[in-house]
Image: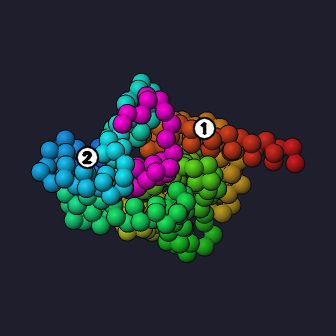
Amino acid sequence: MTVQPGQQLALIPHDYQGQTVTQRTRDGFINATAMCRVVGRSWSEYRRHKNTEAFLQALALDLQIPQVQLTLTVQGTPGGDPRNQGTWVHPQVAVHLASWLSPEFAVQVTKWVMEWQSGRGPNDHAWRQFQDRVSLTHNSVPDGYFCIFHETASIYATLIENGANPGTRMILDISAGLHWGNHWRDHGLAAQFGAARKFDHFYPPYFPQALSNPQKPWCYPDAALPEFRRWMKATYEPVKLPAYLNDQVRQGKLAANDANGVLAAIADHARRKSIS
């Protein structure tokens, strides 16, 4: 089967070894091209394997569908979402493919399929990852200081509520922290509010960043919190955030529709606050 170029797919992004493998929300099909890329093998190699054809024939017979419906191809288009492209396979084919790729990967893909079959929403993973980060930073910031991750939590929530999954590779607080750090330094705010300091920031163990735990980001005096929030509303959200999200779209970490939904939601929230 072939999906027409440009057709939008509602996707569940899964993270494995620092790479993203996407799954279709509607039917559970998983991107086999991305699966093979994770371990450095190819779909065509799997397809030529002596057991593959026999498995596909047996599965099609069991499901009482034509064998051609077990796989589909999504063609790429200029400016299209790269996560949509490649060969996609039925969930049971994905498990069989993963078993051929590696035992560890087979365990993970089986979990993805079982979670999808259980009817859990596509944002469950995103909320869990976000909550895991919150729990690990809840008591780590020194008294009298604030951290960027806590202050950008509402943007993370807006991302997830609008169908986006930041996953383990989209760390928005790093973006905000870098721009705020420049603002802090360029305007000499330490002289006004006191010096910033570093603190231990731990990522959940399944994040790639956890390999170098604890991270040492900056936290800032609570006295500077009003200035930080003013800067977020005046500079980061209307200027820096759109540029960051557009970059995530270009890298294939975020769907364009999700990015637009997030920006629209933030703009609407700001508008309602301004007239309340």
Q: Quadrant of residue 220?
A: bottom right
Q: Amino acid at mark 1?
A: Asn
Between 137 and 25, the one lying in front of the other is 25
- SS for tag 1? helix
Q: Which residue is mark 1?
A: 260
Location of residue 187 in the rendering, given as x and y in whole percent from the top left corner: 60, 43
Q: Is residue 70 left or right of residue 228?
A: left
Taking 145 as reference, is 75 above or below it? above
Q: Residues within 10 Å of mark 1 (few under 14, many from 20)?
A: some
Which stretch appears magenta?
Answer: 1-30
Between disc 2 and disc 1, the foreground one is 2
Q: Quadrant of the N terminus?
A: top left
Location of residue 111 in the rendering, given as x and y in whole percent from the top left corner: 38, 66
The structure's colour scheme is: rainbow
Q: In the image as oriented, which residue stretches furthest toward the top?
A: 78
Q: Could one spot residue 20 in this view of the protein?
A: no
Q: Which residue is mark 2?
A: 37
Question: What's the residue at 13%, 49% (across, down)?
Answer: 49
Between 184 and 233, the one lying in front of the other is 233
Between 26 and 227, the one lying in front of the other is 26
Question: What's the residue at 43%, 62% (across, down)?
Answer: 216
Using the numbered discs, state the Cα–Cα distance from disc 2 to disc 1 in whole angstroms: 29 Å
- SS for tag 2? helix
Q: Amino acid at mark 2?
A: Arg
Q: Residues within 10 Å of mark 2 (few under 14, many from 20)?
A: few
